[in-house]
Image (cartoon, rainbow, N blue to C red):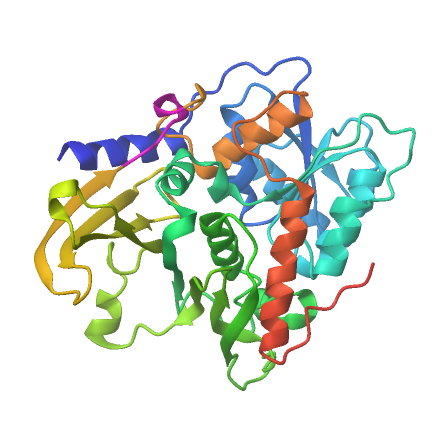
Amino acid sequence: MASLLSIIQRIRTTVYPPQPAKKDDAIRFGLLGASDIAPMAVINPAQSNPEVVIAAVAARDEVRARKYAKKYGIPIVHKGYEELVNDPSITAIYIPLPNGLHYEWALKSLQKGKHVLLEKPSVSNSTQASALFLHPPVPSNITPRPVLLEAFHVRFHPAFQRFLGLLDSDNIERASVTLNCPKYVFRPDNIRLQSKLAGGALMDMGTYGVMALRCVFGKESVECVDVKPRYVPKGKGHDEGCEEAMEVKWRWEGGAVGNLDVDLRRGVRGFGGWLGWIPWVSTPCVKVRHREVLLPSSEDEGLEHVLVKTVTLWNMLGPSFWHSIEILNQHTIQEAGSKKVVKTWMEKEIVKSYTWKEGDGTKGEEWWTTYRYQLEAFADRVKGRESVVWLDGDDSVRQMEMIDGAYGKAGLPVRPGDV
């Protein structure tokens, strides 16, 4: 009961956060597009951050932009993206546009000296990522250089970092990430499933899985071993060459394997299908298995102590509302030569982490979402301060290289996009 009350309280405070007075030098954000994700990603988190103001919005349809501005209390409405980017009163730009438009508008924003919070995936392919993050043609008179961040909000939450801190990359045998969305959420003609706009399961929810595996192993994979795409079904307006689901297997140095299973249109037919969407069954998760042979004590000569540790992070995408880090330690004492089991036992531990107060930092409240932590880190960097967690440009380039490699292994072209 206490746990349920805590969840309700966190959700309530997230929806109705405290609203401190804004500082005079607050970062003034402009939103490109009247998007569905912006309220969760920046508008709501900005309410409780005294250093961030949502100041303007622009959309392809000015009427829609005005309705959006009225709904969310945004004071300035621009007639188009270009006008917003050129607004001298705007400090930073948030870009949640379709993936295929990310590179163009991130580059234009940087060239105007705007800081950029760029939704994942950052761009369409690794060539664009390298051009944008490593060699952006920003005018020399713009100093300091604008901050550019790919918005992998999950990485900024204490739960994800606590999970990573429980892993021993040298002894990982395999890791897996499962990310599913029920079939009724996205139609086959949804913009997320248009390859010409750099869509697809791997480019959408799948990017979180790629990110998680890279963080788990702490280094880049050696090769993409296998890819099994499931394409969008035939139909009017459907991009039949775009994947709506994909299973991918990568290999890391030493033989460790990482698996990703992502499905934007998972079937829910029948009672069994609906049952699959209850918590603990459908929850997005990352599972890591370690195996280590420990040194036995002197009196146990001739025996091996084998430890198999499985660490699972449940609800990776929304840990502020609820999450669980489950640690299972399976111990086996066996004869070194014959592997005959002498004794075995299991230990289980549940760990949760909602704030940095439990670790090295001091910022954060239990109700802060992944997006709120991300916005805090972004503001810190814009203000010239260090942040507890950060993603540099090289990280975003390696991310897109791994995605490109998976498409190549599947015999598919990388998502289109010139520089």
Q: Position of residue 361 (x, y in %)?
A: 45, 21
Quadrant position of the N terminus in the picture: top left
Q: Of residues 410 and 323, which is closer to you in this image?
A: 410
| Residue 202 drawn in magenta | no
Q: Position of residue 219 (x, y in %)?
A: 54, 51
Residue drawn where x is 54% and y is 45% of the image: 152
User: Can you say whether 202 is above or below 88 in the image?
Assistant: below
- Look at the image and give the residue range highlighted in magenta: 352-359
Q: How many marks?
A: 0
Q: Of residues 163 and 203, which is closer to you in this image?
A: 163
Q: Is 136 positioned to the left or the right of 156 in the image?
A: right
Residue drawn where x is 47% and y is 69% of the image: 249
Q: Of residues 142 and 41, which is closer to you in this image?
A: 142
SS majority, magenta: loop
Residue drawn where x is 59% and y is 37% of the image: 70
Query: From where the camera sits, is residue 151 visible?
Result: yes
Name of the residue lying farthest toward the left: 342
Query: From where the camera sits, is residue 80 visible?
Result: no
Q: Position of residue 46 (x, y in %)?
A: 54, 29
Q: Is 340 positioned to the left or the right of 292 in the image?
A: left
Quarter-of-image position of residue 200: bottom right
Q: Position of residue 315 (x, y in %)?
A: 34, 49
Quadrant position of the C terminus in the picture: bottom right
Residue drawn where x is 56% and y is 63% of the image: 222
| Residue 356 drawn in magenta | yes
